[in-house]
Image: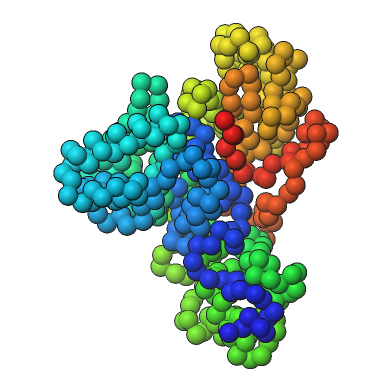
């Protein structure tokens, strides 16, 4: 193979979903944050969609690798099954041998298992990949499972991942009840031109390039034209191009090697292919409880720039949209968000939203505001931030990312390799945020 020629220690463009090679574009980081929110919220039910090869499975594998030990997971990948077979598959993942059980026994066993895990302070997560293949009957079973609860809260968190037709199926009239239970939806769009370049360089670096140039700079635009920024297609083209370069004894991949690979695979430019990418509109692809992220005020459309979700003891108690202006949080009814708690001051904090940023400020409250257990006076909010206010937690989502991502102009650089160090105490006070942009890590309880 070409490893010795290019001085690499492993193949950089394998198609297997290896978390070690994950490149977090802004959009992929947002999807990962939504997956992580299922652990933070007890009523977590998230749907992630994306084109074939967009990176959904790699995100899932990375997410699973980072889970804490108290999370019990059932991961279902075979989805062309009956309702009975689906329930059996779930129980097999939990360690049962349910193949002779009838449906009533399957449901009873699963219900008892979930309640038992809750009693032992374990969180249970069901992940279904390729969920677009689930029949309506199976999706109805998913809805019923999502409703299993104790006297205090639901006991099963759910992530459905699939191709864009999953959204069409969930929006059908027969699945209205299921759609209403979904907390968050997100659609993974392809990488931008600049993300594609950064993605290739990232994978080469992981494979051992050590900063060496392996692809000539003028090859990236050509790779993007033929792959459309779909990670799996990028991997295929880059691997074949490196093989072509190896055959010509080139230690750097040139445009002629890309051309040779394209000719060998008989590809045409991505824009000419019959299968077009799903296009997201100018507004957010995230939906809450089946509603679009931006709602229309009488006579005009409100531009939603951000969104917050308020949690207490793991349950979501409020959701609010952020538009341009001032948003006050406090204990009394005259606030934009009232949190009736003795730990919250009368006017506790405010969020100032502009077209560029959302800034959270403490209004001289008694108990302050905390980010990652550190008290801060003022903070520029990043997508996925979790802020502690009294005994409540507020999770922030930046809606600008969803609107601008899908229609990024060619040549515009919106690629942000999410590798930054944590901020110092002084930086946290001076609004320099140390969190990975868009990445959310569940708070340890």
Which residue is rendered at x = 63% and y = 80% of the image? 3
- Please identify the quarter of the rendering in which residue 125 is found: top left
Describe residue 208's horizontal placement relative to residue 85 as left or right.
Answer: right
Classify the position of the N terminus by image quarter. Answer: bottom right
In front here: 155 or 219? 155
Q: Is residue 410 visible?
A: no
Q: What colouring style does the render use?
A: rainbow
As drawn, 139 above or below 295 = below
In front here: 378 or 91? 91
In front here: 254 or 65? 65
- Please identify the quarter of the rendering in which residue 234 is found: bottom right
Q: Is residue 121 visible?
A: yes
Classify the position of the C terminus by image quarter. Answer: top right
Number of callouts: 0
Describe residue 374's horizontal placement relative to residue 283 as left or right.
Answer: right
Describe residue 391's horizontal placement relative to residue 233 as left or right.
Answer: right
In front here: 87 or 236? 87
Estimate the x, y position of residue 255 in percent, counting from the top left.
65, 81
Describe residue 300's horizontal placement relative to residue 220 as left or right.
Answer: left
Which residue is rendered at x = 47% and y = 41% of the image? 71
As drawn, 420 above or below 384 = below
Farthest-out residue, bottom:
248
Which residue is rendered at x = 28% and y = 44% of the image? 139
Estimate the x, y position of residue 352 in percent, counting from the top left.
69, 26
Which residue is rendered at x = 59% and y = 26% of the image? 393
Estimate the x, y position of residue 355 in percent, counting from the top left.
67, 35
């Amino acid at each position: 193979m070409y490893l010795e020629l290019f001085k690499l220690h492993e193949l950089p463009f394998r198609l297997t979903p290896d978390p070690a090679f994950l490149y977090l574009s802004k959009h992929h980081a947002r999807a990962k944050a939504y997956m992580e929110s299922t652990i933070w919220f007890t009523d977590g039910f998230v749907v992630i969609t994306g084109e074939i090869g967009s990176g959904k499975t790699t995100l899932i594998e990375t997410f699973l690798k980072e889970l804490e030990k108290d999370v019990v997971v059932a991961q279902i990948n075979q989805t062309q099954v009956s309702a009975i077979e689906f329930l059996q598959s779930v129980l097999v993942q939990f360690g049962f041998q349910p193949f002779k059980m009838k449906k009533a026994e399957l449901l009873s066993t699963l219900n008892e298992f979930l309640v038992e895990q809750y009693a032992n302070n374990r969180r249970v997560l069901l992940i279904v990949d390729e969920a677009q293949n689930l029949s309506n009957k199976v999706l109805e079973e998913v809805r019923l499972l999502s409703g299993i609860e104790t006297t205090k809260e639901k006991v099963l968190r759910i992530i459905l991942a699939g191709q864009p037709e999953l959204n069409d199926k969930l929006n059908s009239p027969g699945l209205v009840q299921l759609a209403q239970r979904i907390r968050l939806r997100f659609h993974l769009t392809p990488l931008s031109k600049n993300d594609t370049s950064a993605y290739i360089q990232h994978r080469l670096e992981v494979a051992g390039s050590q900063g060496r140039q392996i692809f000539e700079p003028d090859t990236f635009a050509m790779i993007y034209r033929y792959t459309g920024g779909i990670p799996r297609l990028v991997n295929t083209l880059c691997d074949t191009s490196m093989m072509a370069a190896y055959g010509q004894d080139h230690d750097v991949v040139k445009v002629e090697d890309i051309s040779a690979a394209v000719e060998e695979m008989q590809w045409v430019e991505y824009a000419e292919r019959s299968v077009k990418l799903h296009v997201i509109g100018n507004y957010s692809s995230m939906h809450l409880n089946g509603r679009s992220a931006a709602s229309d005020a009488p006579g005009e459309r409100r531009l939603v720039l951000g969104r917050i979700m308020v949690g207490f003891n793991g349950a979501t108690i409020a959701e609010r949209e952020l538009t341009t202006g001032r948003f006050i949080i406090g204990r009394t009814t005259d606030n934009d968000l009232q949190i009736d708690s003795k730990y919250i001051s009368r006017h506790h904090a405010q969020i100032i939203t502009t077209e560029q940023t959302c800034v959270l400020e403490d209004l001289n409250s008694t108990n302050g505001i905390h980010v990652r257990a550190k008290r801060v006076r003022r903070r520029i909010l990043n997508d996925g931030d979790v802020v502690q206010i009294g005994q409540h937690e507020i999770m922030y989502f930046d809606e600008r990312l969803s609107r601008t991502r899908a229609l990024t102009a060619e040549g515009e650089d919106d690629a942000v390799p999410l590798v930054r160090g944590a901020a110092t105490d002084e930086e946290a006070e001076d609004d320099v945020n140390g969190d990975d942009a868009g990445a959310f890590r569940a708070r340890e309880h």
